[in-house]
Amino acid sequence: MKIISMNPRHGKVSIRVDSLDDLWYLSQVVIVGDLVKSKSVRRIKDKEDKLRSGGGERKTITITVKVERKEFKSDDDSLRFSGVIESGPEDLVSLGSHHTVNVEKESVLTVIKDKWSKIDLDRIKDAEKSTLKPKFLVVIVDEGEATFGLVRESKIEYSDLRRNVGGKYDIKDRESRKMEFYSEVSDIIQNTSGKDGVSNVILAGPGFEKENFFNFISEKNISRINFLVENTGSSGRRAVSEVLKRSTVHKLLAQLNSSQDIQLVERVLERIGKDDGLAAYGLPEVFKATSMGAVEKLLVSDTVFMDQRKVIEPIMLDVKARRGLVHILNHDSEAGQQLDSLGGDCRTLKIQNPIIKYAS
């Protein structure tokens, strides 16, 4: 994210979306009642067009919408703000009519609030800082199988590749098929590097295939990508999580939130399992610990942050004021789902659900 201008006294912050992670940040910052000003495409109809469905010319105009509903889908990286048009070219739009603003990469928009909270301003600044953080790709390589875990700021994005490389007795065809498989894996790595700015790749797996593939790709002399090879006891997506918990790669991944999420939740679950009093979850326990100044790390699911913000935000501000760490997790990530599972069924025990205090 690029902050173009920030004037919270007048309630305005203008930004440019530089990455798909920015959509996740914006989904938490913009709430119902806020104004969103942006360029948007709208079908403009004249009198004749209004008489037939689907008519009219699509034009790009700048409008301001008062948000009534927002929709963020991390699986297809889409963010939409729907509401009533507050301002725009009156010769082209009717003020008071409804419109949906679609936000995507390279979108420029201004968010206008009656009052900007410190939490919201911090989230905008965090989003801008995240753009400068290095991106990582974890590739788990096994016999004819590869799992790709793109470690983004808000989550880990997975994809899989499976090919039949033949049996061990089919030596001739097996070797050629393996070379084709390696070429596909190499192409995906290079395409991801170019598209998402990945400069670091961790190759891992349970057998020798990762070394074989590393020797293959080393011959291609890909200068802009750094490779680190790791052993794992598992394969597939489970192996990606295994790698991210390793102390050997922790320093490389320490700047990325999605990697921190896995390690923080792992430590919290360990403390809860030991029942040593150094971890707590549920609003009553967390509020009590916060009032005592005993919170070192506070983990909050983004769904609970948005649904119960009036209750949670004062706790978050208190923890920050005492120099504690406040960490918001994406509910769609592996760590976020683990966090959501605490306290039982989140539909019936929502207030006790995904807020954790961790103190070491």
Image: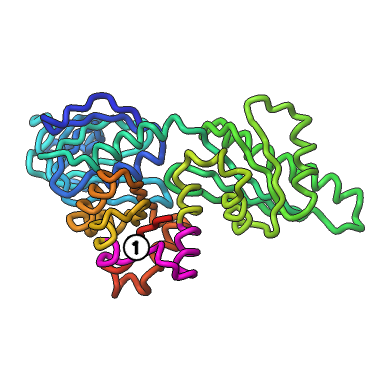
- Answer whether residue 59 is visible to the viewer in this image: no
**Could you tell me residue 6's position as x and y percent?**
21, 27
User: To which residue does mark 1 refer?
Assistant: 354
| Residue 216 left/right relative to 235 | right
In the image, residue 182 lies at what x, y percent? 74, 42
- Give the residues drawn in magenta, as a range: 265-286
Q: Is residue 277 above or below residue 161?
A: below
- The colour mode here is rainbow
Rendered view: 239 above or below 249 = below
Identified at 56% across, 44% down, the residue is 250
- Observer-nearest of 107 and 309: 309
Kind of residue sitting beneath label 1: Pro
Place of residue 78 in the rendered image (x, y in percent of width and height, measured from the top left): 36, 46
Residue 283 belongs to the span the image colors magenta: yes
Residue 302 seen anywhere in this rendered image of the structure: yes
Picture residue at 41% right of the left edge, 35% below the top: 130
In the figure, residue 355 lies in which quadrant? bottom left
In this view, 284 is above or below 22: below
Dividing the picture into quarters, in which one does residue 99 lie?
Answer: top left
